[in-house]
Amino acid sequence: MKSVHVTGPDTEAWVDIDRPTAGAADVLLKMKACGICGSDAMYAHFGGIPPRQGATPLGHEPAAEVAEVGADVEGIEVGDHVVIDTMAFTDGLLGSGGAQGGFSEHVVVRDAVLGRQLRVIPKHIPWHVAALNEPMAVAYHAVNRTDPKPGAKVVVFGAGPIGLGAVLGYRRRGASHIVVVDVLPGRLQKALEIGADAVVNSAEEEVAARLVELHGDGATPLNRGIRPATDVYLDAAGAPVVPPLVTGMAKHGATFGIVAVHKKPVELDFGAILTSELNLVWSMGYPTEIFEVTDDIIANWEKYALIVSHTLPFDQTLEALRLAKTPGAADKIVVTFD
């Protein structure tokens, strides 16, 4: 069968591999959609992920149809539509250094257990929306790491897929006012459509002053200056300007979460941060959220569908990967299978 692998630094290619087979404890999946993540380009840039360097199967944002079910597997039937916990495979992380990748015609789930690697979803959910389950779990874990209280005032930096997913997650957690900051007007418009209460174009507006207008003044005698009364900030942008901007304006006791990948070191003034007693938290993956977010996708799939900007067929996966690497060309690409 056909599969897309990293075959060298900055090189992805089609490879022919054996179609996997399912044993008594396994489930064979026919892939139906797989999203492209920014980390796919990172894996390619380094030529793969050790110990499979030079032969890394790509694709870790999948949705699939069950093709075969082993005799010992319970609760799963041929024809079921499923979303997948790619971190729970027994042969390594799907598409992130493991033995298999989602940009393949079939994937086998070894030692399959419903609720561990697989969650059945209604068949009316479009495949390209179902493929958002994995990145939306990443976004929701970031929301949970910042632990917003009901009524919290929130700012999300970055209106890409994770940032938009975080907007939906903060709304689920009871945030009262959510602002999204970005530099691209199209992305800011999408944030409003998704459910943000306000947006700020940081290329045109002074962010701290605008947030004071939106969230009120949070300055104190010990924490002076222009201090928005924002409770939670989330960096889903990865731009080097974001951390010093937030740490320089955060009110006393605010929380700053980082889910974005920063490719270069960021310098922070801990002495200046001290007086704000800023809570700094980090977020990676989804220890519990992978199937928690599924319910919200099922209930509000039309809103999640707005996050996807492009869909391309499986036979154009290499073109889709190139498009995803092109700055400003696409916001969220999902590869779909026949």
Image: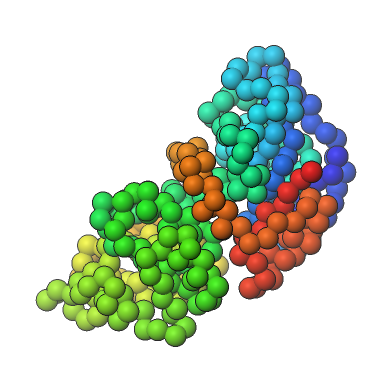
Name the quadrant containing residue 92. top right
Q: Position of residue 318 (x, y in %)?
A: 79, 58
* Front residue (pair 26, 185): 185
* Front residue (pair 170, 288): 170
* Front residue (pair 34, 25): 34
Q: Is residue 236 above or below residue 212?
A: above
* Front residue (pair 152, 254): 152
Residue at x-position 51% and y-position 58%? 162
Q: Position of residue 269 (x, y in %)?
A: 33, 75
Asked whether the viewer can see residue 225, the reply is yes
Left or right: residue 193 compared with residue 177: right
The quarter of the image holding the N terminus is top right
Q: Is residue 302 above or below residue 279?
A: above
Q: Position of residue 9 (x, y in %)?
A: 76, 62
Q: Position of residue 112 (x, y in %)?
A: 62, 25
Residue at x-position 88% and y-position 43%? 16
Name the quadrant containing residue 146. bottom left
Name the quadrant containing residue 84. top right
